Amino acid sequence: MNLTNYVKQVSLEDFGWEFRHQAFWNKRLRTTGGRFFPKDGHLDFNPKIYETFGLETFRKIVRHELAHYHLYYQGKGYRHKDREFKELLKQVDGLRYAPGLPAKKLKLHYQCRNCCTDFYRQCRIDLKRYRCGRCKGELHLLK
Ligand SMILES: [Zn+2]
Ligand SMILES: [Zn+2]
């Protein structure tokens, strides 16, 4: 989808106000769903939120960022703690916080005995069945 056009559409349909700047996908956003940049008025959005939770949730995140955007240009309280921000967000049914993305907890560290390649896994793996992906060597658990 064309992200900027989508944001413009949500802005008109849900706020009745025009979005006049650009919106971009930003893969570097980790836990936040989006970001508003008062400096030049553009919005960044996290493609992982869209891929993981779908369009319905994503639209609520677009509303959240648009609430920052519109209040900022109207000279009103546009920060999370501001009363005007909270009220506008409630009116348009925006998300207060981005839904949590599964945190990467790759705690287990395995290593190949043969080529010393490191592997990180969330759960224990069966060392009798799994071999090194590079050289088929035997793996062992470091911690
Ligand atoms: Zn925000
Ligand atoms: Zn190996």
Image (cartoon, grey):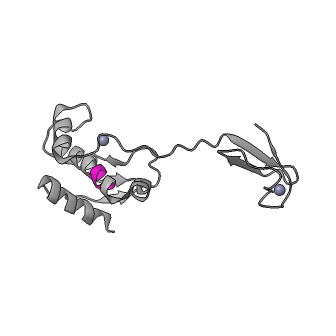
Give the image location of residue 29, x and y in percent: 44, 49
Give the image location of residue 140, x and y in percent: 82, 45
Q: Would you place residue 24 above or below residue 38 in this image?
A: below
Q: In this view, does 54 lie to the left or right of 120?
A: left
Image quarter hosting the N terminus: bottom left
Can residue 40 be seen in this snapshot? no
Q: In this view, does 56 lie to the left or right of 100?
A: left
Give the image location of residue 82, x and y in percent: 21, 32
Q: Would you place residue 81 above or below residue 7 in this image?
A: above
Image quarter hosting the C terminus: top right
Q: Residue furthest bottom?
A: 1
Q: Would you place residue 61 above or below residue 24 in this image?
A: above
Q: Residue at x 35, y 53 (%)?
A: 44
Q: Which residue lies furthest to the right in this view?
A: 114
Task: For ligand 2, give the image quadrant.
Answer: bottom right
Magenta-highlighted stretch: main secondary structure?
helix
Span colored in magenta: 58-62
Residue 21 counted in the magenta span: no
Q: Is residue 11 left or right of residue 119?
A: left
Q: Residue at x 70, y 41 (%)?
A: 108
Q: Nearer the viewer, residue 8 or 72?
A: 8
Give the image location of residue 116, x and y in percent: 83, 50
Can residue 37 be seen in this snapshot? yes
How many marks the image carries: the answer is: 0
Quarter where residue 21 is shown:
bottom left
Q: Residue at x 31, y 63 (%)?
A: 3
Q: Is residue 79 left or right of residue 123?
A: left
Residue 60 counted in the magenta span: yes
Q: Residue at x 83, y 61 (%)?
A: 135
